[in-house]
Image: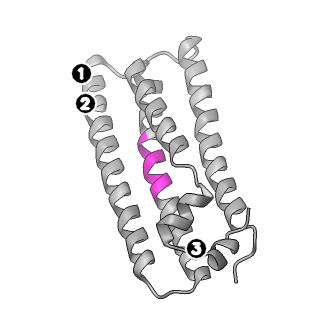
Amino acid sequence: MPAPTYFKTLKTIHLALLSMIAVFSGVVFYLVYSGKYPPTVVAPADRVFQVIALVLSGGMLIIGFRLFNSKVLQLRKSALNVKQKLEQYRAASITWWAMIEGPCLFALVGFLLTNNYAFFALACFHLAILFMFQPKRDSIVMLLNLNSEESRELGE
């Protein structure tokens, strides 16, 4: 049986990922806004970075969401015990969050190299998505189709 702190642990992992990328975004924004880090990439390369950032962003979001959904559907139909379901759900969630965070980091590096605020806007978009997909106890119960006894094992 999983410890009754499973849900708290999952929320802590999400908060750590979200906090780290938010702090990094703030540092990068400060460096660019204050002029302490001038652009190091010429204009034609800026366009290439923009295209890469958009393709990476769209691709990772679509692939990550599909992977997460397929894993949840697989877990929902499986005969695994609740501990195994929760462990696999945690792994699927972390993978999904990483696939949101990766393009965000790329956009922040693009912002730092080019000083183009479009990259910062893209990074903020990814931060918002990561924030929206924070773990919610009721969602986990519904997604994994847990009964009341199994849902108590999630913890608070």
Nearer the observer: mark 2 or 3; the answer is: 3
* Residue at (66, 49) in percent of width and height: 16
Q: Residues within 10 Å of mark 1 (few under 14, many from 20)?
A: few
Residue placed under numbered mark 2 in the picture: 48
Residue placed under numbered mark 3 in the picture: 86
Image spot of residue 153 (x, y percent): 69, 75
Label 1 sits on a secondary structure element that is helix
Image spot of residue 54 (x, y percent): 29, 36
* Residue at (48, 46) in percent of width and height: 101
Specify whether 79 is left or right of 18.
left
Q: Quadrant of the N terminus?
A: bottom right
Image spot of residue 82 (x, y percent): 59, 81
Q: Is residue 114 above or below residue 150?
A: above
The residues bearing labels 1 and 2 have C-alpha atoms spaced at a distance of 7 Å
Mark sitting on residue 44: 1
Query: Magenta region's main secondary structure?
Result: helix
The residues bearing labels 3 and 1 have C-alpha atoms spaced at a distance of 47 Å
Which of the two labelled residues, at mark 3 and mark 1, occupies the earlier sequence position?
A: 1
Specify whether 5 is left or right of 102.
right
Q: Is residue 37 above or below residue 60?
A: above
Q: Amino acid at mark 1?
A: Pro
Q: Is residue 98 magenta?
A: yes
Q: Which stretch is magenta?
A: 96-103
* Residue at (30, 24) in percent of width and height: 46
Q: Nearer the viewer, residue 64 or 34?
A: 64
Nearer the observer: mark 3 or 1; the answer is: 3
Label 3 sits on a secondary structure element that is helix
Specify whether 47 is left or right of 6.
left
Q: Is residue 59 above or below residue 123?
A: below
Total residue callouts: 3
Q: Quadrant of the C terminus?
A: bottom right
Q: Is residue 9 magenta?
A: no
